Image (cartoon, rainbow, N blue to C red):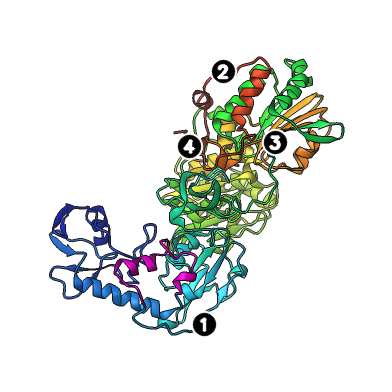
């Protein structure tokens, strides 16, 4: 459609709002309630414009363009209206700008007022006291600075699907509340922090970065979150080579700006002690050493073990490392040292069975995250999406109000049970029988979209016996899923951590019968890459004389520490001290997630680049640099290409 804005003729698609059309033409219109990631609301009335033929000023954020529309975004009438709106906003609460942490360029309310030439309050505030809620661990709500724009409320519902925030009372008495008026720290808040990012004023502020300085003065680093295998796009804000705060990247293809506590708050609030220099055991104590001394110590112990396999070197690397590092690690220890005990920290728990089935089928069988967001019925089995891979849980929760049906299957109570159409709680260890029973029910009821490849005559009766569920409840789930037009199945460790792939195969069979897409919530950031490199087997330390563990910034488990406690010579590269580094013979400092660069493959097969945000200390090396130095000390080389090696194995989900 052709529209004229400030005498400039532009063309925009039908349905475009006047606000977006104006911005595309280079004309900025001030807003407070509008946000790019939210549905237009039209609440603040700051974005008013003149439309030829209209009797009154119109809100540009909700007004769609018409062909031939003529719009003015600046005039005396518009300016007076904006000043009036801003005057009322300033008068309603206690906006003492000099004392606010977002004053001086970061506050959208203040910036809008200054843009209109306002330097004072035309109306005096009502001086009513408003409380400050400091009960939350990660952020503070100052009701004195709230302008009732409802961005936080809408974001909590529209983007996260949590619906913790809301408003009570009406008009000037409107008041932001959590749940039914409980303190934020005691509410159903999941600490994703989306509200802190969308708030246009200083009403919701992040504890860690408050009063450090202006956000307009920080450096921005667009990268990806390494908290799990979703691979969310994030913006790391740094100041003086330290992280100020982390925000979601609204333009990121994977998450569209939504991130969870694991990506936003936990990295900034990291309390562990860093390893800043190499350490070598001298007697009973670890003593500081140079890199040359540490590498010489390692080489002197490892050279006699080259090619000895079972009595040689066992090696393990973190699945939080970049693909480049994981490839170099695998090549050095499998080809260089000749070791067969080379794996990654997840030991195939989330990817071993999945990768083996992809090998067997000879093709990928999982889909993309978009299939979950476009589904009309979702089966959640073997994973708690409220606690693990939370952003996938947000994708599910936020579409439920539109009529999407959810089925949860979990032996224990699942936090999503309350939002599910049907919740089943079978006996532990009965996943295979239940899934086979669902397939049998679909066939029995004549709802199968293809012929079953396995006999299913007695599977429903066996499912009832093994699961402790009724035939009616199993059939109700089968009907709900098979009747959907776009069913999707999200599964996790409850299926992939089993000793055999019977349940996984049954799930793939069931998905085929009902025409559902499948996606598994892998493990850590690069678990897919580790699986593609065959770094997905259990760590078995049996007679090995040495072990090299590249933990990066991952926390070692008690199980891993116990496995390694009797190894004669232990090398650990880690960003942080731990019980594992305390027992090592050589400890090497490692770059953490923000200090390195490299590629990651997320759970839907998307290859993404993680950019470096922080410059590490001089003695802190990346895993890739450490491996190259160790190879040189051993007289070895690292050969091959990480990218081509990544695609040699059939992936469970297509890698692109």
Q: CA distance from mark 2 to mark 1?
A: 68 Å
Of labels 2 and 3, earlier in sequence is 3
Residue 210 spot, x, y in % from top left: 54, 62
Q: Circle 3 — which element? A: loop
Answer yes or no: is residue 161 visible.
no
Residue at left offset 67%, top offset 56%: 412
Asked if 235 appears above or below 644 in the picture, the reply is: below
Sequence-first disc among 3 and 1: 1
Identify the magenta region: 96-120
- Residue 609, disc: 4
Total numbered circles:
4
Specify whether 172 is left or right of 267: left
Q: Nearer the viewer, residue 290 or 500?
A: 290
User: How far apart are labels 4 and 3 at the CA level?
Assistant: 28 Å
Q: Which residue is mark 1?
A: 129
Could you say whether the residue bearing mark 2 is in a helix, strand or loop? loop
Q: Which residue is mark 3?
A: 277
Q: Quadrant of residue 564?
A: top right
183 relative to 553, above or below: below
Q: In this image, 66 relative to 522: left or right? A: left
Which sits earlier in the primary sequence, circle 2 or circle 1?
A: 1
Decide: few, some or many residues near mark 4? Use Cα within 10 Å; few <14, some 14-19, many ≥20: some
């Amino acid at each position: 459609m052709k529209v004229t804005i400030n005498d400039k003729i532009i063309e925009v698609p039908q349905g475009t709002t006047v606000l977006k059309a104006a911005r595309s033409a280079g004309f900025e219109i001030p807003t407070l309630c509008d946000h790019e990631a939210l549905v237009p609301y039209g609440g603040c009335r700051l974005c008013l414009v003149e439309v030829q033929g209209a009797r009154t000023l119109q809100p540009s954020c909700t007004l769609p363009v018409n062909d031939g529309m003529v719009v003015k975004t600046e005039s005396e009438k518009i300016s007076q209206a904006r000043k009036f709106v801003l005057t009322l906003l300033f008068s309603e609460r206690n906006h003492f700008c000099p004392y606010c942490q977002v004053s001086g360029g970061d506050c959208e309310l203040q910036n809008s007022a200054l843009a209109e030439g306002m330097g004072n309050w035309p109306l005096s505030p009502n001086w009513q006291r408003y409380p400050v809620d400091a009960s939350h661990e990660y952020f503070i709500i100052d009701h004195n600075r709230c302008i009732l724009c409802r961005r936080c409320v809408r974001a909590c519902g529209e983007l996260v699907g949590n619906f913790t925030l809301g408003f009570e009372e009406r008009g000037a008495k409107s008041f932001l509340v959590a749940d039914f008026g409980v303190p934020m720290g005691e509410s159903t808040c999941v600490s994703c922090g989306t509200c802190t990012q969308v708030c246009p004023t200083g009403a919701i502020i992040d504890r860690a970065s408050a009063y450090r300085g202006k956000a307009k003065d920080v450096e921005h680093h667009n990268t990806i979150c390494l908290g799990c295998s979703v691979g969310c796009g994030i913006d790391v804000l740094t100041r003086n080579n330290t992280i100020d705060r982390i925000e979601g990247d609204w333009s990121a293809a994977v998450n569209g700006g939504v991130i969870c506590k694991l990506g936003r708050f936990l990295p900034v609030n990291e309390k562990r002690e860093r390893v800043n220099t190499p350490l070598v055991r001298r007697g009973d104590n670890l003593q500081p050493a140079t890199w040359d001394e540490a590498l010489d110590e390692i080489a002197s112990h490892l050279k006699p073990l080259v090619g000895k396999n079972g009595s040689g070197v066992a090696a393990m690397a973190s699945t939080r490392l970049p693909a480049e590092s994981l490839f170099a690690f695998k090549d050095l220890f499998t080809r260089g040292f000749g070791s067969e005990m080379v794996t990654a920290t997840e030991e195939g728990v989330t990817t071993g069975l999945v990768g083996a089935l992809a090998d067997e089928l000879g093709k990928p069988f999982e889909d993309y995250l978009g299939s979950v967001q476009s589904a009309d019925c979702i089966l959640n089995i073997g994973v708690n999406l409220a606690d693990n891979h939370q952003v996938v849980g947000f994708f599910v929760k936020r579409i439920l109000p539109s009529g999407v049906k959810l089925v949860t299957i979990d032996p224990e109570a699942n936090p999503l049970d309350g939002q599910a159409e049907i919740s089943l709680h079978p006996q532990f260890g009965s996943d295979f029988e239940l899934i086979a029973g669902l397939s049998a029910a679909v066939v029995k009821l004549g709802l199968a979209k293809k012929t079953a490849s396995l006999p299913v005559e007695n599977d429903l009766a066996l499912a009832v016996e093994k699961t402790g569920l009724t035939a009616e409840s199993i059939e109700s789930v089968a009907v709900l899923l098979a009747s959907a037009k776009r069913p999707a199945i999200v599964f996790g460790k409850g299926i992939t951590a089993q000793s055999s792939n019977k349940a996984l195969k049954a799930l793939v069979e069931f998905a085929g019968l009902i025409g559902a897409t499948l996606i598994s919530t892998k493990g850590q950031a690069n678990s897919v890459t580790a699986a593609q490199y065959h770094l997905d087997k259990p760590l078995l330390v049996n007679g090995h004389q040495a072990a090299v563990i590249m933990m990066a910034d991952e926390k070692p488990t008690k199980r891993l520490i116990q496995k390694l406690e009797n190894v004669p010579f232990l090398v650990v590269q880690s960003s942080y001290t731990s019980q594992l580094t305390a027992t090592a013979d050589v400890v090497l400092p490692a770059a953490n997630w923000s200090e390195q660069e490299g590629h990651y493959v997320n759970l839907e097969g998307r290859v993404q680049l993680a950019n470096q945000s922080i410059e590490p200390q001089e003695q802190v090396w990346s895993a890739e640099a450490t491996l190259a130095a160790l190879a040189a000390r051993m007289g070895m080389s690292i050969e091959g290409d990480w990218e081509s090696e990544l695609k040699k194995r059939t992936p469970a989900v297509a890698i692109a």
